[in-house]
Image: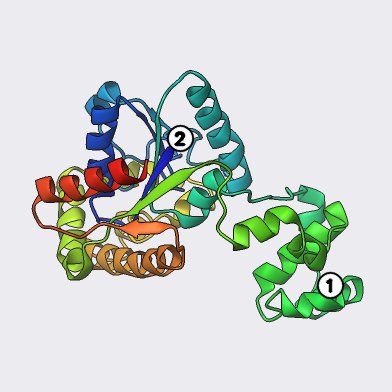
Amino acid sequence: MRIGIVGPTASGKSELAERLARELAAHIVSVDSMQVYRKMDIGTAKPSPSIQQQIPHHMLDVVDPAEEMSVAEFQTIGLGVIEGREAAGNQMIIVGGSGLHFRALIDPLVFPGSDPEIRASVDATPLATLVEELLAADPGAANLVDLRNPRRVTRAVEVVRLTGLTPSVRHDTVEAQAVRDYEPVAPTVIVGVDPGGMIGRRVVARCDAMFAAGLLDEVSGLAGKVGRTAAQAVGYKELFPVVAGEITEDEGRSAVVRATLSLVRRQRTYFRRDPRVQWIQWHNDADKRWQALSQLVELTA
């Protein structure tokens, strides 16, 4: 039985996962789209080196910040880790707040891949022309793809050109139906952690701790050295203007808090849609949170 722990940023899920890993002698798989980048430690709240020495962690520091890592690549590497460690008899705890990355590891999500030349050709084509091409290949795509969303139309056309698979064909596969029905590829208990109204104060405290730990210095060292995806990471995107002298540190700090709270709202929306998530009752006392988690895992595993 795999164990998943999900929830918004600053909910305390990592601390619970670490305590559970110690109890079960388990390995932790991080499902954080930004913790895969090396040298982005403070702003992504990576486990400290000492914790990583005590508890085996996976999917941390996989690529350099200037590189890109797609969800498909994350899935390939992550599933290889999980299946390999399970074959060796290890209990796996999958924890994080990146919803799509989490589902990529527990559900039969299929990513068609990409081709640089096809992507460049599609990107150079006007949206109206892409919509015409998509509907000519698949009239039913109008019911499956937001035709007003350039990113979704571009991706749909790219997949058709690359694989010949239209949105309607992909929608009707067994795997796609399993994803819609929230059927995991292996038995998994999923625990949700959310502090409710406490989240605002926890986000501010988290940001204060990051600044005290040297977040600005970390961001300064990365300026001009990050790729497109890493540059969008919360806590970095808002502070690059600070190190460039365009805004003050206080303005940057406020921007980080706002961006984090916005991320929290998106994470809550994503995970609340998943009927498999069993939300533990929140307690300010960490021991009571642990008791709620351990009881749920014992009852379900």
- In screen coordinates, is 150 left or right of 235? right
- Quarter of the image for residue 76 reads top right
Q: Are marks 2 and 1 in contact (CB under 8 Å)?
A: no
Where 109 sits versus 269, above or below? above
Please state which of residues 20 and 151 is positioned toward the viewer in this rendering: 20
Question: Percent x, y for residue 212?
Answer: 14, 47
- Quarter of the image for residue 165 reads bottom right
Which amino acid type corresponds to the residue marked 2 in the rendered image? Met
Where 282 sits versus 261, above or below? above
Question: Percent x, y for residue 205?
Answer: 14, 57
Residue occupying image coordinates x 41% and y 70%: 269
For label 2, the residue is 59
> Dot 1: few (<14), some (14–19), or many (≥20) neighbours within 10 Å?
many
For label 1, the residue is 134
Where 157 sits versus 287, above or below? below
Which amino acid type corresponds to the residue marked 1 in the rendered image? Leu
